[in-house]
Amino acid sequence: MSALTYYSAIYNILPSKNIASKICFPGYTCDLLPQEIGLHELADLVASMQKICFKDDNKNNENTNRIYNMFMDTNKRTVAVAMSLMYDANTTDYTDFVDGGSATVQMVKEDSFEHKQPWLNEVCRSKRMQGNKSPLPIIMDMIDKYITEKLSKRYKKINGLYLYVEKKPDHGDPAHLLRYYPDYGFKEFLLGNEIDEEYYYMKKCYGKDLSPLRKTKAKSTGISKKHKTNSTVKKVRSI
């Protein structure tokens, strides 16, 4: 490599094989990233990024274990991790990145949904150098392509991409993400018949929107960080 370059790909999560397999997209360099990566190794890589974006010190590998368990959960299934990592010239070790971004896509069926839908989670900008362009536009574009070109062939009833926006985050500007995500096509909507006390919800439509969900007129002051992936609330983070 002769200059700083982002290497970008989607990793398809295969819990039965305990690996993730790389999917590359036209227009994005991906050759430095491994073709396959073990799920423990991928969880550790994502956790290392979250030390910066979420200030999570990963004490006793708690965050690595959380992410790995999320990968292995076949009920609330994490189907993919999007990764875009920047490297110095002549770097050959894909873990030795100087800047990066990541996010996960999880298939979840909410109570008011007829079918499972993809949810955007764990959105992270691991900024290690000043002055670089954010890799998150690459992340968002690859996820759109992955859902519309790959995932929708497996899940025929996908009608969009969803995310949670927490109303009372532990850190960060609550209004930031609800101003940020509309730049990527997301709009706020009301999930169910009552306003949720913990979360706002956002959706990006793919094609014709056939969902019965109503848009909310409530004021937006949230930040995406948690996700109800089990009977209890599990942390799911965002920038």
Image (tube, helix red, strand yellow):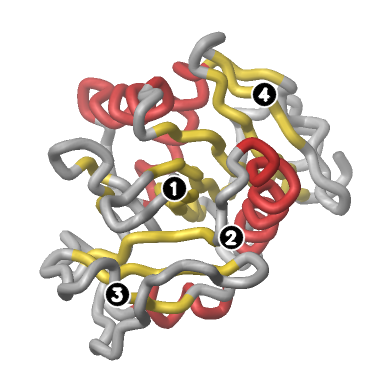
Question: Which residue is label 4 attached to?
Answer: 21
Is mark 1 in CB contact (under 8 Å) with mark 2? no
x, y percent for residue 187: 46, 78
Inter-mark Cα distance, 2 to 4: 21 Å
4 or 3: tag closer to the N-terminus? 4
Please name the residue shown 36% across and 55% down the image: 113
x, y percent for residue 127: 50, 55
Q: Mark 3 or mark 1: which is in front?
A: 1
Inter-mark Cα distance, 3 to 1: 17 Å
Question: Which residue is label 3 attached to?
Answer: 190
For the image, the number of numbered tags is 4
x, y percent for residue 117: 47, 50
Q: Which quadrant would residue 216 be assigned to in this image?
A: bottom left
Residue 3 visible here: yes
Left or right: 30 in relation to 208: right
Please name the residue shown 27% across and 49% down the image: 227
Is mark 4 in CB contact (under 8 Å) with mark 1? no
Please name the residue shown 15% across and 64% down the image: 198
Inter-mark Cα distance, 1 to 2: 28 Å
2 or 4: tag closer to the N-terminus? 4
Left or right: 47 in relation to 172: right
Q: Any mark on residue 146, and which?
A: none
Please name the residue shown 52% across and 34% down the image: 79
Determine the secondary structure under disc 4: strand
The amino acid pointed to by label 4 is Ser
Q: Mark 2 or mark 4: which is in front?
A: 4
Question: Which residue is label 2 attached to?
Answer: 136
Q: Mark 1 or mark 2: which is in front?
A: 1
3 or 1: tag closer to the N-terminus? 1
